[in-house]
Amino acid sequence: MTDAAAVSESPARAEIPSVPRRIALGAGVAIGVAVGSGYLPYYLLTNLKPSSVGFGVAATLPLLLGIAIGLFEGAATALKPTRLYGPLSILSGLVGIGYLYVIFQNSTIHVTVSSGGLSIGFGLLILLLILITGLSLIAGVVTTVEDMARPGERLPFDYPAR
């Protein structure tokens, strides 16, 4: 047996980061996603209402759904080496699709000026984002099924040894 054959036959090892590092990374993801998809839309909606810009959604709804998405994404990131990663990815995808669907139903911004009004539609962009989130949801389902069928098999690919 040659050295190359011995190397290829040895099982792949995974270098999983420490729990504190994964928690810190998950917290960073949770905060980033919550701010980007929750607080930023909330801030814009509350500051644009006095300017005669109407959207049709209560400002707190994107805030609450954005925080929920952030929490699920952060938890999934922290728990990536475990079997909970897939189900948390599925939950995050479902909440994300719900979030985008609510926005899609009100995907026209109405701007009122003294001489009339202007409507700007962005429904196609929201549909594309729903498609991307749906692909993420499918990836969560595949990960869950693979983890149930072959536990630990994806870890060397997610966390390759150096």
Image (cartoon, helix red, strand yellow):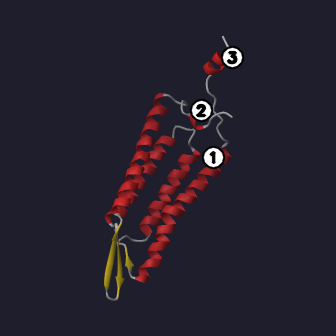
Quadrant where the C terminus is found in the figure: top right
The alpha-carbon separation of the residues under discs 1 and 3 comes to 35 Å
99 over 77 or under it: above or below: below
Residue beneath disc 3: 3
Q: Do the CB atoms of the residues marked 2 and 1 lie less than 8 Å apart?
A: no
Secondary structure beneath dot 1 equals helix
Q: Residue at image x 67%, y 42%?
A: 18
145 over 95 or under it: above or below: above
Q: Residues within 10 Å of mark 3 (few under 14, many from 20)?
A: few
66 over 49 or under it: above or below: above
* Mark closest to the chain's N terminus, 1 or 3: 3
Specify the amino acid type for callout 1: Arg
The alpha-carbon separation of the residues under discs 2 and 3 comes to 21 Å
Residue beneath disc 2: 156
Left or right: 42 in relation to 116: right
The label nearer to you, 1 versus 3, is: 3
The label nearer to you, 2 versus 3, is: 3
Residue in front for this viewpoint, 154 or 129: 129
Residue 87 image position (x, y, % from top left): 46, 43
